[in-house]
Image: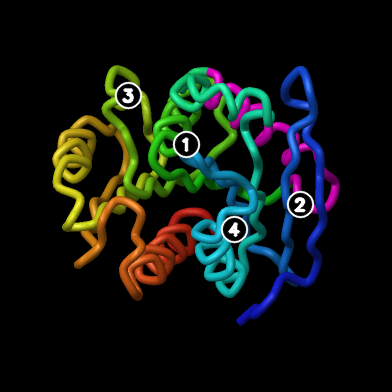
Amino acid sequence: MHEVPARRESVELPVADHPLPGILAVPTEPRGVVLFAHGSGSGRASARNGVVAQVLWQSGFATLLLDLLSDTEAAAGTFAFDIPLLAHRLCAAAAWLANRPDIGALPTGFAGSSTGAAAALLAAASPNRRVHAVVSRAGRLDLVDPWLPRVTVPTLLLVGDADPDVLRLNRVALSRLAGPRRLEIVPRATHLFEEPGTLESAAGLAASWFSEHLAG
C-alpha cells in the first residue's frame, strides 16, 4: 500500500490561453492515472478531492488535480457551468498526460464531482477520448443528458442518500449510459459528502472501480 506518493510535483498544462496549474502525484509503480475534474467553487487544492486522491495513491494510482479554469474565469462564475469548455480542457489534459514519457502509457481515468462530473462524462463521450473508466461523485449529469448514450467506458455513479434531487438525476443517467455502469448510494451523505466517513466511503468505492476497470 502507498501511504504517500513517491513523487509529487506542481505542473502547468498548456490547455488554455493561459497555462492551468495542477498537482501531479505518482506512487511507486503506478497502475494507472486518474485526472480530477472539480465542480464549481473547487480546485486543485480542494481538501475533499485530496482525501479521494490519497485513497487512490494507496491503491497504486497516480493522480492529477487540475484547475480547469483560470482565476479570472473562476471569479466570473459563469464558466463553471460551461460544460463543453470544461470537457475540452479535460480532453486536452488527458492528451498532455499521454505525451509524458514517465506515465504516458498508463490507462487514464476521470474522477469528477458535480459539474466536473458532467464534464468528465462529456469528455468520455468524445470520439477521440483518452479515458478508460469514469467515477462521478454527486454529478450534475442532467447537464449532459443528450451525450450519455455515447459513453461506453465503465462508469460509476456515487450519490448520497440524503441528496434526493441529484440521486433522482443519477438514476435517470444510469439508464442512459451505454457502457458498464453502476450506481452506488452512500448512506447518510449529502451533496458535498461532509458527513463523517461518507467521503472516505465514496473514495473507497472509486478506488475499487478503478482497480477493476482501469488498472493495467
Left or right of residue 70, residue 165 in this image: left
The residues bearing labels 1 and 3 have C-alpha atoms spaced at a distance of 14 Å
Q: Is residue 86 magenta?
A: yes
Main structural element of the magenta stretch: helix, strand or loop?
helix
| Circle 2 SS class | loop
The residues bearing labels 3 and 4 have C-alpha atoms spaced at a distance of 31 Å
Question: Which one is earlier in the sequence, the residue at label 1 or at label 4?
Answer: 1
Q: Which mark is residue 216?
A: 4
Residue drawn where x is 59% and y is 44% of the image: 43
The answer to the question of whether label 1 and label 4 lie on touching residues, with beta carbons closer than 8 A, is no
Residue drawn where x is 37% and y is 30% of the image: 151
Mark 2 vs mark 4: give the one in front: 2
Are there few (<14), some (14-19), or many (20+) residues within 10 Å of tag 3?
Answer: some
Q: Which residue is mark 3?
A: 143
Residue type at tag 2: Ile
Q: Which residue is mark 2?
A: 103
Q: Position of residue 133 (x, y in %)?
A: 46, 46
Residue type at tag 1: Ser
Are there few (<14), some (14-19), or many (20+) residues within 10 Å of tag 2?
Answer: some
> Which stretch appears magenta?
85-104
Q: Which residue is mark 1?
A: 40
Residue type at tag 3: Leu
